[in-house]
Amino acid sequence: MNLVINFIGFQLGWFACVLGGAAGKPLLAVCAVVFVLAVHLYRSNNVFAELCIIFTAMAIGFVWETLVIATDWLTYPLSIGVSNYAPIWLVAMWALFASTMNVSMAWLKKRWLWASVMGAVFGPLAFVAGEKLGAVIFLERWYALLALALGWAVLMPLLLWLADSFQRRYQFMEKI
């Protein structure tokens, strides 16, 4: 049941982020993510390990997305704030994604090749879906998609490894 709730929460949060970003309402997207994360943390056996992966993923996501923006291969049309940095709704999406690492994506742990392939395929596909919903514009489509595929081929296994490491390191903090 936790897997289903986690999966549905991620999907709802993803749509809230993309639609909020596309509509120029990033704070609504962030509020939706905070709600999904609150439910996730309430249901978690190890809140501290979950918070570690969430905040680590947000930092990685901010740096990665800012680097991708710096290539000028894609842009976020209605980003509020400095346009050279990852928009807040996108960083919130990284927090949301991190909440799946120990639940609905846990089956990929220690399956590094599968994680890499899935990251390389589904990472860019998420951006294509975001483009169709108006949240992102590809300026150099093929360069951007290639960069996203290569990046996600590394980032997906990295996030899974980090989630597993935090879970093992802080297992003494699990709920009884």
Image (tube, grey):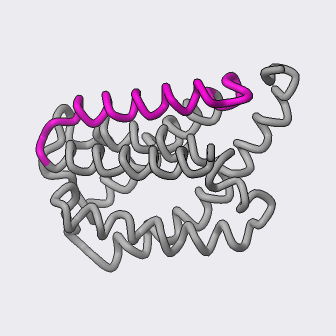
Q: Magenta-highlighted stretch: main secondary structure?
A: helix
- Identify which residue is drawn at 20% across, 42% down: 20
Q: Give the total of numbered labels.
A: 0
Classify the position of the C terminus by image quarter.
top right
**Residue 171 sits above or below residue 5 on the image:** above
Q: Where is residue 67 in the image (x, y as percent from the top left)?
A: 40, 51
Q: Position of residue 156 (x, y in %)?
A: 60, 58
**Residue 117 sits above or below residue 42 on the image:** below
Is residue 126 highlighted in magenta?
no
Question: Would residue 23 appear left or right of 102 to someone viewing this image?
Answer: left
- Identify which residue is drawn at 44% across, 34% down: 36
Quadrant position of residue 85: top left
- The magenta region covers 23-51
Question: Would residue 30 appear left or right of 175 to someone viewing this image?
Answer: left
- Identify which residue is drawn at 71% across, 62% down: 108
Is residue 42 highlighted in magenta?
yes
In depth, the one of 154 and 113 nearer the eye is 113
**Residue 158 sits above or below residue 123 on the image:** above
Q: Position of residue 132 (x, y in %)?
A: 20, 68
Question: Would residue 99 appear left or right of 124 to someone viewing this image?
Answer: right
Q: Which residue sits furthest bottom?
A: 142
Q: Position of residue 157 (x, y in %)?
A: 67, 59
Quadrant position of residue 72: bottom left
- Identify which residue is drawn at 64% across, 55% down: 105
